[in-house]
Image (tube, rainbow, N blue to C red):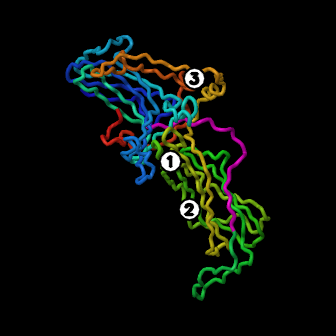
Amino acid sequence: MSVRIVLDDPHTFYTNLDFISGRIVLNLSNDENISAIVVKLEGESRTVLMRPMNVPNPQLYAQRQRREGVATENHKILYKVAQVFPNQSQGVGGMGQAYTLRAGQHEYPFRMKIPFNNGCMEPQAQQQMGLGGGRYPPSLTGFPGEAEIRYYVKVTVQRPSIFKENRRSAIGFRFMPIEPPRPPKTTNESYARRPFQFTAGLATYAKKSSMFKKKQTPLSDTAPQGEVDARLPSPAILTCNEPLPLRLLVRKLNESPEQVFLMSLQVQLFGQTEVRAMDISRTETSTWVLMSLTGLSLPIGSPSDAVRTESLVDSNLWDRIPLPNTVAPSFHTCNLTRRYELEVRVGLGYGVPGEIQPQTVTLPLRFQVEIFSGIHPPAALLDAIANAPTIPTNASTPNRPTTTPVRPSDPAYPAQLGTPGAPAIDDVPPSYEDAMAEDMTPADGPRREYSGVTDVNAPNMDEKGGIQQ
């Protein structure tokens, strides 16, 4: 027996409200008894951290897992189940019911929709992300053995005999979430500012002995001083695979006959990934050099400009350079958080055209920024959420304990999904956003490149090298 998953028209990446469809291809060399074929749409956020050695607090080692020195968290952020065999027309038998499939190839189509809200039901995650869960994080790797977020479709062929194990197969896919609603556009800007001041009278370049040397232009005793502003729209939001909406301004603060020049410009993006596992946390820093220009001599403004004149640096230097497709959107989920900072380093010099002084100043300007995916939610969904009815709560009414009927189960013959005695496939009700989005079409608009996962079907962090069952 062999089973595999074939996706219809595989996307480069999927997003919320997209449909994932395909076929389960089951090949049987002999007649086989099958009780059910179940397809699952799953997403996992997994972290593993080593505990620090020689911790004086003995309470940290009260439990066996803590004594082992490894902290692990594995959150099921997406979990949807669909049974493709037997279908409703064929019915579902009792405990141990089996259907005999003839030898040959059998195909079963499936079609599942990616929900809008995170399905992680951890209590701490609900407190952090709010009632109804939070947004799904993007696919993420790059921290081998420490952290990863993976999405995949998995099929399980359930066999009624306890002497024959179930057969499973899985195929991974990349996921990029729909971005949250953006605030209305305004003329407000976020800025980082630093002053600069050159020192007059410092030594110039060493003179070269030549009978044809040009006499250097004498400089004044007043070197230029001013301020440099780096500005982004407020709030500071960048978009995956799009250029920076950056403005650079140089403000003149004194009278000086010398010219100010842009000598270098470097823009870097720093990503801080907070990895959490139980009571341990660690922050990993990733760096992307968006641009690095040196050897420039671009004049800024004019010596004849009035004091406090602002000169705009030509944006053609950076406005055609998009963010790399390895940059994921900002996110926060149960055990992982990704934040970003943008640093602009401006190198300035002064002098006269053709005779720039060796004295340069480098000004680092840093922002805290958010990065959005650029996939806009459907307008109808935004309207539905904005008009969502408020559910009144009565603090005086005590919470009623929910009772779950005990399902009979034989330890030697455990109940399987899709059969009586097993947990129901859809026990968790959808969130309000998911209920409103059920009949809505997938998000339209451009789908930017994203390669947050090098190989979606590579083994995960488990030592066995397989997907968690």
Q: Is residue 71 above or below residue 443?
A: below
Seen from the viewer's position, the closer of residues 98 and 177 is: 98
Q: Residue at x 57, y 26 (%)?
A: 433
Q: Residue at x 52, y 50 (%)?
A: 272
Q: Position of residue 381 (x, y in %)?
A: 60, 27
Quarter of the image with the N terminus in it = top left
The residue carrying mark 3 is: 436
User: Disc 2 vs disc 1: Cβ atoms closer than 8 Å?
Assistant: no
Horizontal relation, residue 209 to residue 94: left or right: right
The quarter holding residue 84 reads top left
Mark 2 and mark 1: Cα distance apart in space: 28 Å
Q: Is residue 178 magenta?
A: yes
User: Disc 3 vs disc 1: Cβ atoms closer than 8 Å?
Assistant: no
Instruction: Looking at this view, name the residue that lies furthest to the right.
Output: 306
First along the sequence among labels 2 and 1: 1
Span highlighted in magenta in the image: 174-196
Mark 3 and mark 1: Cα distance apart in space: 32 Å
The residue carrying mark 1 is: 273
Seen from the viewer's position, the closer of residues 155 and 358 is: 155
The residue carrying mark 2 is: 293
Q: Residue at x 62, y 35 (%)?
A: 181
Discs 2/3, front: 3
At mark 3, the secondary structure is helix
Residue 352 visible at all: no
Mark 2 is surrounded, within 10 Å at the Cα level, by few (under 14), some (14 to 19) or many (20 or more) other residues, namely few
Residue 51 visible at all: yes
Q: Amino acid at mark 3?
A: Met
At mark 1, the secondary structure is strand
Quarter of the image with the C terminus in it = top left
The quarter holding residue 205 reads bottom right
